[in-house]
Amino acid sequence: MPDYERPRWPLMGAHSARYNLRTNIMKHQTKAQRQARYLAEFNDAVIALDPSKSGRIDWPTALHFYFTGVPVADAAARYLDNGDDK
């Protein structure tokens, strides 16, 4: 199909409406939801690197990494390197 015949906007069907709803929900998360997602990803990253830490994460340290803006992968590596598990 030549470019001049192709519509310049996405067609609004059921799929587009679901996609837009999902992306809008993901964009507008509350602070508590963002924090919970970060902590869950941090937990998964730490366990992936060292399974013996399952259930033994020092949450104040994890919250410190969250509030200082450290990415999850870096936070998990720093957590395990520094021996911050108690």
Image (spheres, helix red, strand yellow):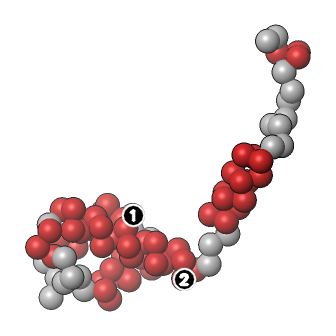
The three-letter amino acid code for the residue at tag 1 is Pro
Q: Can you tell which quarter of the image residue 70 is in?
A: bottom left
Q: What residue is shown at x 22% (from left), y 73% (from top)?
A: 79
CA distance separating discs 2 and 1: 17 Å
The three-letter amino acid code for the residue at tag 2 is Ala
Location of residue 83 in the rendering, given as x and y in whole percent from the top left corner: 13, 77
Location of residue 22 in the rendering, given as x and y in whole percent from the top left corner: 66, 59
- In this rendering, the answer to whether 11 lies above or below 78 is above
Between 21 and 15, the one nearer to me in the picture: 15
Q: Which residue is mark 2?
A: 32
Q: Nearer the viewer, mark 2 or mark 1?
A: 2
Q: Which class describes the residues within 10 Å of circle 1: few (<14), some (14-19), or many (20+)? A: few
Which of marks 1 and 2 precedes in the sequence?
2
Q: Can you tell which quarter of the image residue 45 is in?
A: bottom left
Instruction: Quarter of the image for the C terminus: give it.
Output: bottom left
- Describe residue 60's horizontal placement relative to residue 50 as left or right: right
Disc 2 element: helix
Q: What residue is shown at x 69% (from left), y 51% (from top)?
A: 19
Disc 1 element: loop
- Describe residue 86's horizontal placement relative to residue 36 as left or right: left
Location of residue 38 in the rendering, given as x and y in whole percent from the top left corner: 43, 72
Q: Which class describes the residues within 10 Å of circle 2: few (<14), some (14-19), or many (20+)? A: few
Q: What residue is shown at x 77% (from left), y 52% (from top)?
A: 17
Instruction: Quarter of the image for the N terminus: give it.
Output: top right
Q: Which mark is residue 59?
A: none
- Describe residue 74's horizontal placement relative to residue 1 as left or right: left
- In this rendering, the answer to whether 78 lies above or below 64 is above
Q: Which residue is mark 1?
A: 71
